[in-house]
Image: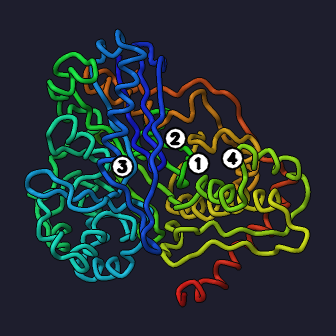
Amino acid sequence: MYLGLDLGTSGLKTVLCNEDQQIIAQNNVPLSVSRPHPKWSEQNPEDWWNAVVSSLTQLKASNPDEMMQVKAIGLAGQMHGAVLLDDEGNVLRPAILWNDVRSATECEELEKSEPNFKALSGNPAFPGFTSPKLMWVAKHEPEVFAKVAKVLLPKDYIRFRLSGEYISEMSDSAGTLWLDVKNRKWSERLLAATNLNLSHMPKLVEGSAEGGKVTDELSQKFGLQQNVIIAGGAGDNAGGAVGIGAVSPGQAFLSLGTSGVIFVCNESYLPKPEAAIHTFCHALPNTWHQMSVMLNASSCLDWLAELTNTKDVLTLLNEVEQIADEPSDIIFLPYLTGERTPHNDADAKGVFFGMTATTKRANLGLAVLEGVAYAFADGLDPLLESGATINQISVIGGGARSELWGQILSDVLGQELTYHEDAESGPAFGAARLARLAFTGEDVSKICTTPPVKNTIKPNPTKQQYYKPRLERFRRLYTSLKPEFSSL
């Protein structure tokens, strides 16, 4: 048996897998986000730990025999979050999350302070990344920065609570802007640019290697055997890739989670920072990947459902399906918390354009589905221009449940999309696979296979022509409004 934990922004997902890679039990524990100021996004790490305790306690109660057979645990999680600990392991302030964009000014300062910044990191400085967050803390909360002894990523804080050890792995650490991504090690020069050094960083292992063991006390608490190992694990996107079997060059997936991601697996290091493309280590040795990342995807539907007092997102989608074939001139810019690829614009805002007196909630919902698809198209183009080869695109994440959204995405992107069984369990299932690899040392190709195909969606040529002028209008709107965004 193997456990996979995925610490997302909106909740913790846990899966329990058997030797045949079947999910025999799973649960979700919801989490909330605090936004005390504009551009801020924070969570209390103690809430993450409480979610882990709740999740594993539930599994102990429902599957006690299987929990006693668990050999290893894998961790995946939201990337870039800054968890600041003092020299006794105490949390110094709420964790600053991946979609927090308060540190845009610090990004400019960071790139100026280290002339070879992009060459060393392989990435531009995005406000959501970890490094500029520490510069912000040093500037605005110097009393906190002075006490920082360790900086951990969210999933690695869970590891610390499970094992008492400070350990991370390559795929998640690549998103800090402190990692030498090409050589898979911490960069002392990048650390020095933020007045930190190697002592502030956790030990690094590969995602499929051992990265700590569960303490005896917690093993007893959760009904586990002694010495259960914890795999290095992965950032959520690399974990999703392992779960969906995207581990070979040319394999790709599109993630419709809180954020939106197009992920392409590469056999070598192929940086393209000038295009706002993410170039990270994969969770497997000697493998890298590129990503186009947008900050707002299915979160836009959640936002609209709450804004319009809709019962839930499913109700909203049902309403949208009733009018989906009607032509619409409403354009939605999905930049509710700024944007990364291709704009790297922390000031970008969400916009509905083209509403009239007859506009209804369903029309806005359709505009959201289309607007997110247009933003994905904006991110796909620079990926392809950078030399990425895409042979197949799988779809994962909560948004994968909507076939209507899948068809819109396929039509806008001009790409065939493949849906797999248990696609929503991607990162958690990938974490369980990494746990198995860490325990057994089996061949990656035998374990990280592609799950059974549920269905495929092909572009509709008529709809492709329909969306082309609307995509161009979407792009013109952003360009026209960009000066207004920055002036707010």
Task: Identify the mark at residue 166; answer none if there is no mark.
Answer: none
The type of residue carrying mark 4 is Asp
Q: Which residue is mark 4?
A: 312
Q: Which residue is mark 2?
A: 251
Q: Tell which tag, 3 or 1, sits nearer the viewer.
A: 1
Q: Is residue 420 above or below residue 171?
A: above
Real-space Cα separation, disc 2 to disc 3, in angstroms: 14 Å
18 up-or-down from 132: above or below: above
SS for tag 1? strand
Report which residue position mark 3 lands on. 268
Q: Is residue 294 left or right of residue 111?
A: right
For the residues marked 4 and 2, what is the alpha-carbon distance in whole angstroms? 33 Å
- The spot of residue 233 in percent (x, y) is 31, 38
Badge 1 or badge 2: first in the primary sequence: 2
Determine contact: label 4, label 2, CB under 8 Å. Answer: no
The residue positioned 38% from the left and 27% from the top of the image is 433
Query: Which tag, 4 or 3, sits closer to the chain's start?
Result: 3
Q: Residue 304, image x and y in percent?
A: 68, 59
Cα separation, mark 1 vs mark 4, equals 17 Å
Q: Name which residue lies at 19% across and 72% down.
A: 194
Q: Which numbered marker is on residue 256?
A: 1
Secondary structure type for disc 3: loop
Give x and y (percent) for residue 166: 16, 45
